[in-house]
Image (spheres, rainbow, N blue to C red):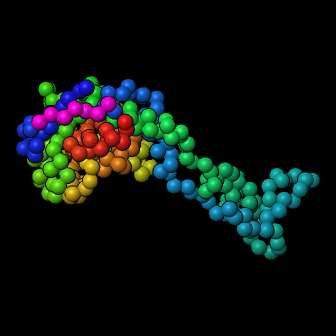
Amino acid sequence: MVERPIFDLEGEVVGKIELPPVFSKPVRFDLIRRAYLSTLASSRQPKGTDPNAGKRTSARSWGVGRGLARVPRIRGEHHPTVGRGAFAPGTVGGRAAHPPRVDKRLDEKINKKERKLAIISAISATGDKELVKSRGHRVPEGLETPLIVSKEIESLSKTNQVKKLLDKLGLSKELKRCKDRWGKIRAGRGKMRGRKRQRAKGPLIIVSEDGGIVKAARNIPGVDVKIVDLISVKDLCPGGVPGRLTIWSETAVQKVGDKFV
């Protein structure tokens, strides 16, 4: 079994813990990617147009034999719009050719066992230092992953307390990396499509219960806090890439070991 040191709130080693078998499972990159895309697809909101948009008109085709296109034309007499094309997709104010529909299937299904195995693989990847470094995280030499902190971390209620703890764990460069990239303007067309700014993903703190740390850490760029019962592949592997730098509370490690036996 693999052992990891337990740090207190001062960054000092106060003991050791034996990692559960879930941290030694093989990392299945294919299942992680599949589960990530499934989660991403299910978060999309259906959208569609009015089914009658562009169809509220008296336009009818004049048929053949007039030397004109058979496009539907507005009916009537003694009005400027009479004879103007309407209704058809190629006309002004006409219907859309292939509009979005609210009944389109957006979700991507995945088997329960595959999803469970993907989460196990994602948890295991947090203990692989090479994978964590390959994601771009700044991990100090001599510091093993995942980082385990005593259960007192769950009761932190001030942002300054969380920042001090991360600094004492040697993650100052990691926080600086996240801060420098926080709000960076994206290059390309994405600026016009609701994703103007890029935001780096930093450490993920996993706790067994919220004693105030969720609010305390939410204003630190790149840092996320999750309850161990609610973690998903989307949290552990942003972008579908495994190996996020993760800080576990001592009780969260014990709980995840009991959950994934």
Query: How far across and down, in percent of the image, does residue 258 sit?
Result: 33, 41
Based on the picture, tell me whether residue 239 belongs to the magenta stretch.
Answer: no
Q: In the displayed structure, does residue 77 sit left or right of residue 53?
A: right
Image position, residue 192 (x, y; %): 43, 49
Give the side of residue 217 with respect to residue 76, left or right.
left
Residue at screen point 55% across, 55% down: 46
> Which region is colored magenta?
15-21
In this view of the protein, can residue 216 be seen by the observer?
no
Screen quadrant of the C terminus: top left
Which residue is at a point 17% across and 42% down the rendered structure image?
149
The structure residue drawn at horizontal position 61% and vertical position 49%, both measured from the top left corner, is 105
Figure quadrant of the N terminus: top left
Considering every residue shown, the one lying at the far bottom of the view is: 78
Residue 110 appears in view: yes
Reply yes or no: does residue 16 show up in magenta: yes
Q: Nearer the viewer, residue 215 or 88?
A: 215
Instruction: Decide: is 73 above or below 177.
Output: below
Q: Closer to the camera, 125 or 85?
A: 125
The picture quadrant where one finds residue 202 is top left
Residue at x 25% of width, y 48% of height: 207
Measured as percent of width and height from the top left, residue 38 is found at 50, 42
Q: Which residue is nearer to you in this view: 171 or 169?
A: 169
Where in the figure is residue 136, as x and y percent of width and height? 26, 31
